[in-house]
């Protein structure tokens, strides 16, 4: 098995438009990810909150970098910030080709407790913290589903 | 069977042969015609085949309108002076190379299939125009495409040329390794392509430098939008071989105008705009403006004039007196460079010294100044010191100590009279080198002064590492008015510093009585400026000293 890498990034692009527009946008990103990721051995999760996407992607270096490059060439992702990129020993989102934790938590302020520490400025947000948030939510969802 | 070989001369003098020999030769010729590998046919005036060999039948067998084609070839050769070489594309895609010779009636056609050669050439041509690393076009392709656009004016929208390069790429390549650097360049190439329209031309010119020819769009808006887009795209993070890489880009743009006809000119204009963009900071783009070109030209012209000035003896020196405040006596002179250019008139050193330093011309100008100042000062009636400015570039030159020795020896000037003024910048890039040079100069007996003190980094560490003979306080502090307490405080601090370290302190640029009184009060040891005297030509030094001498 090839070395596993994990990428955590934040897309600060504010998607303009109403809830319907945002839902459509998220839906199209999810559909593409759920279609493309399995053959590339990529797993991960996406959360949308406070007008931002936070995403974790895990998988082999080559697949990960190719996918990331596609995202980077997409004009819609202007202000993308990589928070972490490193080798890892195991997947945190084993069961998710691309988990999405937005709808079930609509109206909740997931980054709220971070806002206090960072003054709503995500510049200081660490990759590991964001990763933990997303992982915790995923675990909650999995437990609830079980 | 006729003999296969006939002596060459019998071919030439066919009519002189016996009928039997003639027949033999004719048989040989026919055999050769029929059996040779090259397709051959004798064609009548209307394109009808009179004699063909197997190779011809094989080559043209499937061509339906052969007679019409041959008639056309026949007509062409008749008007072209009897011989014609051309390439014919057959309906099945093959290319045939033909050689046609006009006969008394009709013509002789020989030829063969050159399709593979054509394909190979096309492949080679493409290879020669492709950048191996990124598979984009290369400089050759780009220049050819640009030349083509320049040659065909009259499009609705003018083409725009963008050159793009990456900041810090070289350093990155060195740190992360060539393999990662190459992979990054491939990603950069892809990102550039993702932003282009189909008919735009893109190439990697060299290293981390790319070029785009944007076609068929309203300018300059489209080029500005593309530049902004490329800078955004290329500035986004990259993941390469498990590493996160951040890099930025700059772009230079030329919108082609009808007067631009030269490829090199357009490309160098884009480069000029690019270098401006880079000096604006990473992530910027700039349009080429004629003014940039003019500035560059005028810079180049100045450089040429400057190089010429030395041999044409357009430089001269004037000397500004320095007066000791305690004794009121003249303590020395500072040599100042003047350039009287026949076309420009008097050019201020402020306007040409920076360029002279950039281009290195300063080394020879500086040497001339040093030799001239020593020679002229040696002829003066007194033992006054003569201060000569030494630029940082000169100071870094390994020859400096030798030049100083030679100037002293040539002029016979006592080394103690020569004072070299250096600025703080000389001490800045110090790897111990400048200190060695300073000590070597001092060991000659020459004195050293620190010029323009207070304007640079003013690190007191310099003063500790090397004991200068003199500190010159920059005129900007001296000229401050009475209500500039900060300037005055600095003058006072430097004077007191000089006093404790045993260094003279010279206040420069003293123009008024008020400034004079102040620097006296602030404790400077010497003073220089228009109030004492304007700079004088060497010939007037004797009379100046004479006038100042106390009358009996």
Image (tube, coloured by chain):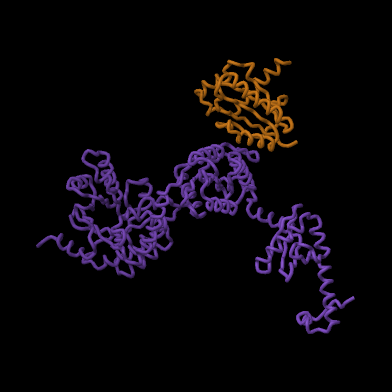
Chain colours: A orange, B purple
Q: Position of residue A46 (x, y in %)?
A: 64, 25
**Viewer-proximal residue among B313 and B528:** B313
Pick out the residue farthest to the front.
B46
Q: Position of residue B154 (x, y in %)?
A: 51, 48
**Viewer-proximal residue among B519 and A109:** A109
Q: Quadrant of the N terminus of chain B?
A: bottom right
Instruction: Please give left or right for residue A54 compared with residue B530 in the image.
Output: right
Q: Quadrant of the C terminus of chain B?
A: bottom left
B131 relative to A31, above or below: below
Say whether residue B225 is visible: yes
Residue drawn where x is 84% and y is 71% of the image: B31
**Viewer-proximal residue among A26 and A111:** A26
Q: Position of residue B168 (x, y in %)?
A: 53, 45
B20 relative to B506, above or below: below
Quadrant housing residue B193: top right
Q: Position of residue B49 (x, y in %)?
A: 79, 63
Say whether residue B387 is visible: no
């Amino acid at each position: 098995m090839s070395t596993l890498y994990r990428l955590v990034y934040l897309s600060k692009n504010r998607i303009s438009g109403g809830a319907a527009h945002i839902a459509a946008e998220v839906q199209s990103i999810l559909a593409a990810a759920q279609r493309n990721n399995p053959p590339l051995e990529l797993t991960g999760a996406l959360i949308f909150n406070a007008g931002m996407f936070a995403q974790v992607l895990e998988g082999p270096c080559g697949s990960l970098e190719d996918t990331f490059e596609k995202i980077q060439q997409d004009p819609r992702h202007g202000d993308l910030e990589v928070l972490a990129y490193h080798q890892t020993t195991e997947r945190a989102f084993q069961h998710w080709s691309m988990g999405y934790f937005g709808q079930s938590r609509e109206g909740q302020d997931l980054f709220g407790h971070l806002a206090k520490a960072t003054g709503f400025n995500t510049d200081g947000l660490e990759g590991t913290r964001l990763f933990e948030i997303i992982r915790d939510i995923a675990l909650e969802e999995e437990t609830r589903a079980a | 069977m006729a003999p296969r070989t006939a002596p060459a001369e019998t071919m030439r003098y066919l009519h002189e042969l016996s009928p039997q020999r003639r027949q033999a030769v004719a048989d040989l010729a026919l055999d050769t015609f029929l059996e040779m590998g090259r397709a051959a046919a004798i064609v009548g005036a209307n394109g009808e085949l009179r004699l063909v060999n197997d190779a011809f039948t094989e080559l043209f067998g499937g061509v339906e309108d052969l007679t019409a084609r041959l008639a056309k070839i026949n007509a062409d050769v008749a008007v072209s002076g009897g011989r014609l070489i051309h390439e014919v594309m057959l309906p099945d895609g093959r290319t045939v190379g033909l050689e046609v010779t006009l006969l008394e009636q009709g013509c002789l056609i020989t030829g063969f299939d050159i399709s593979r050669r054509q394909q190979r050439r096309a492949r080679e041509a493409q290879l020669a125009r492709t950048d191996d690393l990124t598979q984009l076009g290369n400089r050759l392709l780009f220049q050819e495409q640009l030349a083509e656009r320049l040659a065909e004016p009259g499009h609705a929208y003018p083409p725009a040329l963008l050159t793009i390069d990456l900041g810090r790429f070289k350093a990155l390549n060195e740190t992360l390794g060539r393999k990662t650097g190459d992979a990054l360049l491939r990603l950069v190439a892809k990102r550039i392509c993702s932003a282009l329209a189909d008919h735009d031309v893109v190439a990697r010119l060299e290293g981390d430098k790319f070029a785009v020819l944007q076609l068929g769009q309203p300018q300059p808006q489209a080029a500005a939008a593309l530049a902004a887009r490329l800078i955004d795209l290329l500035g986004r993070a990259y993941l390469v071989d498990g590493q996160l890489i951040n890099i930025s880009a700059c772009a230079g743009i030329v919108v082609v105008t009808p007067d631009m006809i030269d490829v090199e000119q357009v490309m160098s204009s884009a480069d000029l705009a690019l270098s401006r963009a880079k000096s604006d900071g990473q992530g910027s783009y700039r349009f080429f403006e004629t003014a940039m070109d003019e500035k560059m030209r005028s810079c180049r012209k100045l450089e040429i004039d400057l190089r010429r000035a030395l041999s044409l003896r357009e430089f001269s020196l004037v000397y500004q007196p320095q007066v000791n405040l305690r004794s009121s006596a003249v303590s020395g002179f500072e040599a100042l460079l003047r350039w009287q250019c026949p076309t420009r008139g008097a050019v201020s050193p402020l306007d040409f010294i920076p360029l002279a330093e950039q281009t290195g011309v300063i080394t020879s100008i500086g040497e001339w100044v040093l030799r001239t100042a020593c020679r002229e000062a040696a002829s003066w009636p007194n033992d006054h010191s003569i201060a000569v400015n030494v630029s940082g570039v000169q100071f870094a030159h390994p020859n400096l100590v030798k030049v100083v020795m030679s100037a002293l020896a040539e002029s016979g000037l006592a080394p103690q009279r020569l004072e070299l003024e250096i600025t703080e910048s000389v001490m800045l890039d110090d790897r111990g080198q400048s200190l060695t040079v300073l000590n070597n100069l001092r060991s000659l007996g020459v004195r050293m002064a620190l010029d323009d003190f207070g304007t640079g980094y003013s690190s007191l560490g310099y003063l500790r590492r090397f004991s200068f003979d003199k500190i010159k306080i920059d005129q900007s502090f001296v000229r401050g008015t009475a209500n500039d307490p900060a300037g005055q405080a600095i003058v006072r601090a430097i004077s007191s510093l000089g006093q404790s370290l045993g260094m003279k302190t010279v206040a420069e640029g003293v123009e008024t009585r008020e400034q004079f009184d102040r620097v006296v009060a602030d404790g400077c040891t010497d003073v220089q400026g228009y109030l004492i005297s304007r700079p004088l030509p060497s010939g007037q030094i004797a009379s100046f000293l004479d006038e100042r001498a106390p009358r009996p």
